Amino acid sequence: MFVLSLIMNLKFNIMKALLKITIVVAYMFIIAISIAKAKEPKLVLKAYSEAKTLVLDLENVSSNTYITLKDSESNIIYSENVTKHLYAKKFNLKNLVDGMYFFQTEGQFKSTTYTLKVEDNKLIILDEVETIKPYFVETKGHVSLNFLNLDKKDVSIKVFDEENRLVFEEEVTNKMIVEKAFDFSGAFDGNYTVSLTCGENSYEEYIIVD
C-alpha cells in the first residue's frame, strides 16, 4: 500500500512539473507574441454613421501591412498595400448599398477584421476581431513555425512543392502551442509552400531552395 501511494505521489508530482513547464512555455510564447505585436501598426478606425464614412489612422506601419474592404460575398471593393510609417485615410462609403461589409488590416503578426453594416443611409461598426497569425522564422534552409492556438482548434500543417504536390502533412489537435521545424537543406531546388490552416483561417509561407 505504501509503495502504491509512493508511486501515485510520484506520478502526481511529475504531472505537476509537466504542467508548470507547459505554463512557462506558453507564457514565454505569449510574451514573444506580445513583443512581436508591439511592432504591428497601431490602428484606430472610426465610423461616422450619418456621413457613411470610415476614417483609418495607422502608426508604425511596416511594408507588410495590407488593408482591404470586402462585401458579404468576399468581393474586394478596395485594397491597398500601406508603405508609409504614418498613414491616414478617409473612406467614403456613400455609394455602398445596404448590407454587410468587412474591413481588414493585415500585418506580419496579426490581422484585424471589422464587420460593418450599411443600412438606411447609416454606417455602423458591429464588431472587431483580432487574429494572431503563425510566426515563421527562416534561417539557412531551416524553417520554424510557432502558432498560439488559444482555443485549441484543430490545426493542419502541409508543405507543397512548386508543382503543388503534397510533400508533408500533419494534423495537430488539442494544442495551445503549435510548433514545427522543417529542414529544407537536403531538399531539391525549387519553391516550397508551408501552409497552416486553423478553422476558417489559412496562412502560407513561401520558401526558396537553391
Image (cartoon, grey):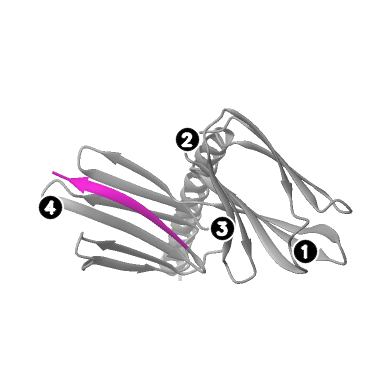
Residue 50 image position (x, y, % from top left) = 89, 53
Range of magenta residues: 202-210
How far separated are the C-alphas under marks 2 and 1?
29 Å
Report, in whole angstroms, how far the alpha carbon at label 3 lies from the one at label 2: 28 Å
State which quadrant residue 10 falls in. bottom left
Q: Which residue is mark 2?
A: 63
Image quadrant assignment for residue 73: bottom right
Q: Nearer the viewer, residue 95 or 21?
A: 95
Residue 193 is covered by the magenta coloring: no
Q: Which mark is residue 117?
A: 1
Asked which secondary structure carries label 2, the reply is loop
Q: Give the amino acid at mark 3.
A: Leu
Q: Is residue 71 left or right of residue 18?
A: right
Percent coordinates x, y for residue 88 in the rendering: 68, 34
Residue 150 is tagged as: 3
Which kind of residue does numbered mark 2 sit on? Ser
Badge 1: residue crowd in 10 Å (few <14, some 14–19, many ≥20): some
Q: Amino acid at mark 4?
A: Ala
Our reading of the magenta stretch's main secondary structure is strand
